[in-house]
Image: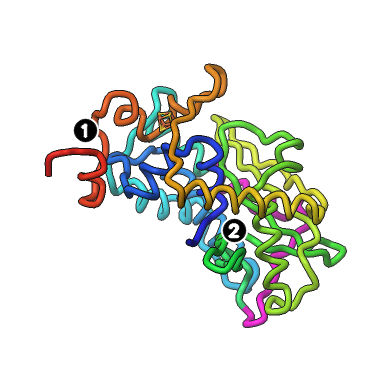
Amino acid sequence: MIISPSQVLKGQTCMKQVFFHYELGIRPNITSANLAFGKAVDSSVMDYLAALSTGTSLPSMEDVFLRHWKKETSIPLEYSATKSESKMLDIGVKMALALPEAWEKSELMVFTMPDGSPALQVKLAVQISKQDSLRGYLDLIALNQEGKVVIVDIKTTGVEYDDIYTLQSDQLTAYQILVDAHADRLGVERADKVGFMCLHKKTEPVIHQPQIVERRSQDRVQEYLDTCGWYIEDYNAGRFNRCSLGAFNSPCKMCDFKNLCSSGDTDDLIIPDRAIAPLKLVA
Ligand code: SF4
């Protein structure tokens, strides 16, 4: 089985979501505009960093964002009550224009892979048991001013991340495991630091300076590998129970499968053939 940090996180939230998404392959039939916005911003950041690290000239950041936004909005999207299409476009352009200055301030430099390419959207995998592997797509491997290897995950968020989350995030632990496993191939000793760079999506967007912390300890790494192992055990044993958590932190309101899960309604979903029998639907 191949697992990803986001799959494990979903499992820690609600295994019924895992069942609908990964086991049955069900997807919402309308994409959230927030998701499309995140992808357009991510692609703009990657274009900027790639051009910067290869010395290629880049068109204006406004044009870069507009190109990606056009692509992401070519399908029907669901907008929230507070963020219309024009509002999101405005925020995205402001964010893209603010990126060069924010990146320069960070004093980070994109790491160059042994083949000469910039270490952006790096796909890495590592065997974690005889049959199972952990796979991740790292936004960025960078070097700081002291030449330390820093794994940075770029996030487009509605809220600023707390420092405690950077210290605890399993996603960053997973990325450290992946870089360490490929250290020889990457030509580094190990990942020295991990962190997030948050692009805060509000009317006047803010690009926060990267929140970077020291690498995880060996105990933390082992704990995460245990978590992965238990997720795989639950999945293989078919333990796909619902989990609503508490009213104050319930994942249900934001869940793509809430109508299916609560009342069997599939109108807002794309149901692949393999899900018809398990859901006892008529083909
Ligand atoms: S609605 Fe709640 S319980 Fe059901 S799959 Fe979604 S998160 Fe899980």
Residue labelled with disc 2: 139
Question: 10 Å neighbourhood of mark 1: few (<14), some, or many (≥20)?
Answer: few
The amino acid on which the numbered mark 2 sits, given as a three-letter code, is Asp
**Mark nearer the viewer, 1 or 2:** 1
Q: Is residue 177 visible?
A: yes
List x then y, in percent, for residue 239. Answer: 45, 41
Quadrant for the C terminus in the image: top left
Say which residue appears at 65% left-offset and 69% top-offset. 53
Q: Secondary structure at mark 2?
A: strand
Which mark is on residue 267?
1
Region in magenta: 94-116
Q: Is residue 87 left or right of residue 123?
A: left
Q: Is residue 214 left or right of residue 26?
A: right
Q: Nearer the viewer, residue 281 or 76?
A: 281
Say which residue appears at 56% left-offset and 39% top-offset. 12
Q: Is residue 110 magenta?
A: yes
Query: Relative to residue 193, is residue 11 depicted above or below?
Result: above
The amino acid on which the numbered mark 1 sits, given as a three-letter code, is Asp
Say which residue appears at 54% left-offset and 24% top-offset. 245
